[in-house]
Amino acid sequence: MHLVSWNVNGIRAIVKKGFEENIRAMKPDVFCLQETKASVEDVFEAAKLFPEYKVFANSSKARKGYSGTAIFSKEEPLNVSYDLGLDEHDQEGRVVAAEYPQFFLVTSYTPNAGEELKRLNYRQTWDVAYREYLVWLQRRKPVIACGDFNVAYQPIDLARPKENYNKSAGYTQQEIDGFGNLLNSGFVDTFRHFHPDEIKYTYWNFIFNGREKNIGWRIDHFLISQKLLPHVNEALIYNEYHGSDHCPVGLKIDIGR
């Protein structure tokens, strides 16, 4: 199976920027989107470009045109669920989970700690709840968790670690610890596992022409339950694809149906 995850920074915007061609070039069996910034109906409208995929979308209840996640799957999942089941965390359409015979696939858009880290306390409560949710799923069958985790875990994962440490959203010790707790709960950061020394980013700030200068962050991840690691063939960052301030990330895995 070839799985792809992409923070599209607005699905209605990216469909005008070669999105269909890029998805067809990657040929995923499943692709997951974050920050669709659209209603469920708008996602279904965009999904008409991909009639071979079943579509499952979640949107923000609190603010229109904000957040939002979706899973596009060629194979019909056994079951699909939305959100974490906690009202505090379920207002912004940040989670979709699809159950397949051999694993759960969860896509999520982790809350950003925000300007001046104003939302850092909320982000910490999210990290705890999200980890508990994945651990709960993992008790039933292995988990593949993908999406924009809004954290660079190690200095190698961002271009300017010293300047950003404990000053910028996505690289505070609290966020690093939250991601570390996920890894300590039986999950593997697939790209870093297979590419321990490779410098490659998944997000660049448009305002500072970050992509042109390659001043970026690796904050989009595929995490898997340790049990699945022997089945993984490749963990990829597709930074040749444009259309968003993020690029897609991918996972190729051999697993029985």
Image (spheres, rainbow, N blue to C red):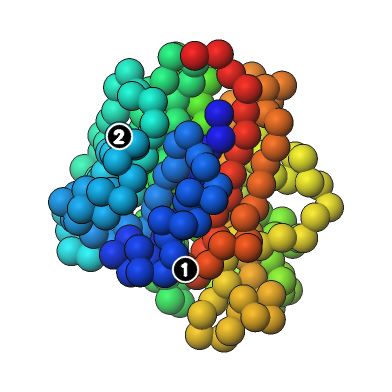
- Category of crowding for the residue at label 2, using alpha-carbon neighbours closer than 10 angstroms: few (below 14), some (14–19), many (at least 20): some
Which residue is pictured at 63% across the width and 43% down the height? Answer: 180
**Left or right of 168, for residue 189:** right
Answer whether residue 138 is visible to the viewer in this image.
Answer: no
Answer whether residue 235 is visible to the viewer in this image.
Answer: yes
Task: Give the CA distance from mark 1 to mark 2.
Answer: 23 Å
Residue with the most extreme bottom position:
208
In the rendered image, the quadrant that contains the N terminus is top right
**What residue does disc 2 label?**
54
Q: Position of residue 164 (x, y in %)?
A: 64, 74
Q: Amino acid at mark 2?
A: Lys
Q: Position of residue 93 (x, y in %)?
A: 27, 49
**Left or right of 93, for residue 198:** right
Q: Which mark is residue 243?
A: 1
Work out whether residue 150 or residue 201 is closer to the camera in this orientation and state it: 201
| Vertical relation: 182 (above or below) 149 | above
Which residue is pictured at 54% across the width and 51% down the height? Answer: 25
Which residue is pictured at 50% across the width and 40% down the height? Answer: 28
Image quadrant assignment for residue 239: bottom right
**Left or right of 37, for residue 2:** right
Q: Tell me the element at label 2.
A: strand
Q: Position of residue 223 (x, y in %)?
A: 58, 37
- Category of crowding for the residue at label 1, using alpha-carbon neighbours closer than 10 angstroms: few (below 14), some (14–19), many (at least 20): some
**Sequence-first disc among 1 and 2:** 2
Which residue is pictured at 59% across the width and 31% down the height? Answer: 224
Work out whether residue 94 or residue 181 is closer to the camera in this orientation and state it: 94
